Image (cartoon, rainbow, N blue to C red):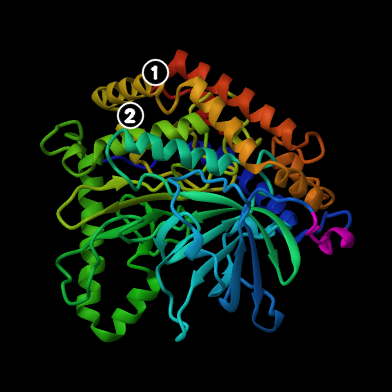
């Protein structure tokens, strides 16, 4: 069994988390914010300007303020440009733009500290119950995230990662490796909020994570969608991995606990047992054995692809937070959908994330205490697994594949074209609100140093150099560098 590592380093650097925590508290409380720009808060969209993206207007019931704790009622309508900037297959969106009743609330954790807020939207029926319907050119679903690219001045880190993720997943014949999305401009109660990326929320469903429903009447037939959370999980495995319920949801279990506590507990136990079996195999001395080791419990290809996309983008949270995985009853555990890349692609200074070199998978994350699941480092102790990573990466880097340099550069240019003048309006809306000096400590894309197009050039340059570095070091992904260990 693997024992906890890094105790000596924890003692040596035990004050570092305290210092980081103080900085985070200052950041989120806004104590060191030097000014509040009221004019920017009142900025309104000039409706005489031509727009090339869908424009969504939301009006909340009686103008009620949107909050994190409770969803509030509202109405959503969408105006469409001509021609349509469709990234996905060109479905006819004409029936998807009428006024719709919604529930809306704030979304996220760290992102709630930013001036431009992210939102979670659910369409509802006359009884105020959530319904699954298509949205613009995307297939039916229940939950939609309006991602605010406030700290991503290139405005495309999530969109780019999800596009590449879908292409990588498609080449391995699984469809739920990354969510779909579209760009929009947004106003709420006639206040212009800027550019948003509307993203399919990771959820169980035919058009999302296509796993069977888990039913209280059949507690022995369990499917699940879960997230590694690092802190405040719904349960912790015996190897110390904190896990959040995403499907079934915590609220569903709370209801089941009242209806049939025995069956509800059996479902929870069956979920945990499946993860424990995987971790026991992975942590055991025979973990490399194809019959009784880790490969008997997981979709290995999905773990290979997951590591590749996290390393290419150098995503700080890829192995410790926003780490989603799922399984159907009787099937192996599969990684995905991938999620949350606004601090990736060199957009973070902490943990040397802005550098083009280094492996994320081997970092210990001493500063903020969010520890990664041990799964990925352990998998890279197996030469056979490393061989699969190397072979898959080399394939994806071939001309015409998802990670070829030409394709990535062309995809970035495509997003620039799709965003169009909305990128300049986003700048105009928020540029004078980046008054917190902590931004220059945490974020590599310092808000006052580059325009939208300047940040696009930066992400193109960073991604190219990152891929070149991986090209020359991929065979050594299993080696732990002491500099990684200390950060």
Q: Is 32 within the magenta?
A: no
Figure label count: 2
Q: Position of residue 82 (x, y in %)?
A: 62, 50
Residue 10, horizontal then vertical, whole percent: 52, 41
Side of 176 relative to 372 (left or right): left
- State the image coordinates of residue 153 (x, y, percent, origin top left): 70, 41
In the rendered image, which residue does mark 2 sit on? Answer: 380
**Mark 2: few/some/many CA within 10 Å (<14, 14-19, 20+):** many
Mark-to-mark CA distance, 2 and 1: 23 Å
Main secondary structure type of the part rendered in magenta: loop
- Location of the C terminus by quadrant is top right
The residue located at (41%, 56%) in the rendering is: 202
Task: Classify residue 480 by image quadrant.
Answer: top left
Q: Could you tell which of marks 2 and 1 lies nearer the N-terminus?
A: 2
134 or 258: which is nearer to us? Answer: 134
Q: Is residue 174 visible?
A: yes
Of helix, strand and loop, which one carries label 1? Answer: loop
Q: Which element type, helix, strand or loop, lies under badge 2?
A: loop
Q: Which label belongs to residue 212?
A: none
Residue placed at 18% from the left, 58% from the top? 329
- Residue drawn at point x = 47 percent, y = 20 percent: 470
**Which residue is nearer to you in this view: 432 or 24?**
432
| Magenta-highlighted residues | 37-48
Judge whether 177 appears above or below 308 on screen. below
Foreground disc of the pair 2, 1:
1
Task: Give the farthest residue toward the top.
Answer: 472
* Rendered position, 380 above or below 438: above
* Residue 5 appears in the figure: no
Q: Which residue is mark 1?
A: 398
């Amino acid at each position: 069994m693997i024992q906890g590592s890094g105790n000596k380093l924890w003692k040596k650097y035990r004050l570092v988390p305290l210092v980081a925590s103080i900085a985070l508290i200052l950041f989120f409380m806004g104590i060191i914010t030097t000014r509040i720009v009221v004019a920017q808060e009142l900025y309104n969209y000039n409706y005489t300007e031509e727009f090339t993206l869908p424009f969504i207007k939301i009006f909340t019931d009686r103008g009620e303020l949107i909050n994190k704790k409770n969803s509030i009622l509202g109405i959503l309508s969408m105006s469409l440009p001509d021609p349509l900037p469709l990234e996905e297959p060109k479905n006819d969106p004409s029936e998807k733009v009428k006024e719709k009743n919604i529930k809306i609330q704030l979304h996220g954790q760290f992102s709630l500290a930013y001036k431009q807020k992210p939102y979670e939207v659910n369409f509802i029926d006359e009884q105020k119950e959530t319904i699954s319907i298509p949205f613009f050119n995307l297939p039916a679903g229940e939950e939609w995230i309006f991602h605010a690219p406030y700290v991503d001045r290139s405005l495309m880190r999530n969109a780019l990662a999800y596009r590449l993720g879908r292409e990588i997943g498609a080449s391995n014949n699984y469809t739920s490796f990354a969510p779909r999305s579209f760009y929009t401009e947004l106003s709420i109660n006639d206040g212009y909020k800027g550019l948003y990326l509307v993203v399919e929320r990771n959820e169980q469903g035919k058009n999302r994570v296509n796993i069977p429903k888990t039913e209280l009447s059949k507690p022995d037939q369990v499917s699940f969608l879960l997230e590694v959370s690092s802190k405040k999980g719904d349960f912790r495995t015996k190897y110390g991995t904190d896990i959040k319920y995403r499907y079934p949801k915590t609220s569903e279990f709370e209801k089941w606990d009242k209806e049939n506590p025995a069956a509800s507990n059996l479902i929870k136990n069956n979920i945990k047992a499946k993860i424990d079996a995987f971790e026991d195999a992975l942590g055991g001395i025979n973990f490399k054995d194809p019959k009784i080791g880790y490969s008997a419990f997981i979709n290995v290809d999905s773990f290979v692809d997951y590591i590749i996309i996290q390393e290419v983008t150098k995503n700080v949270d890829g192995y410790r937070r926003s780490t989603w995985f799922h399984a159907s009853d009787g099937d192996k555990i599969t990684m995905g959908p991938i999620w949350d890349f606004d601090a990736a692609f060199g957009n973070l200074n902490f943990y040397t994330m802005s550098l083009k070199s280094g492996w994320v998978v081997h970092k210990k994350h001493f500063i903020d205490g969010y520890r990664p699941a041990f799964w990925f480092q352990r998998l890279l102790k197996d030469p056979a697994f490393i061989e699969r990573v190397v072979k898959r990466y080399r394939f994806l880097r071939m001309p015409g594949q998802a990670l070829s340099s030409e394709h990535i550069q062309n995809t970035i240019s495509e997003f620039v074209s799709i965003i169009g003048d909305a990128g300049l309006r986003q700048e105009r809306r928020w540029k004078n609100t980046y008054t917190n000096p902590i931004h220059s400590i945490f974020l590599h894309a310092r808000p006052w140093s580059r325009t939208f197009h300047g940040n696009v050039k930066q992400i193109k340059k960073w991604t190219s150099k990152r891929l070149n570095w991986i090209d020359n070091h991929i065979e050594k992904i299993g080696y732990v560098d002491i500099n990684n260990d200390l950060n």
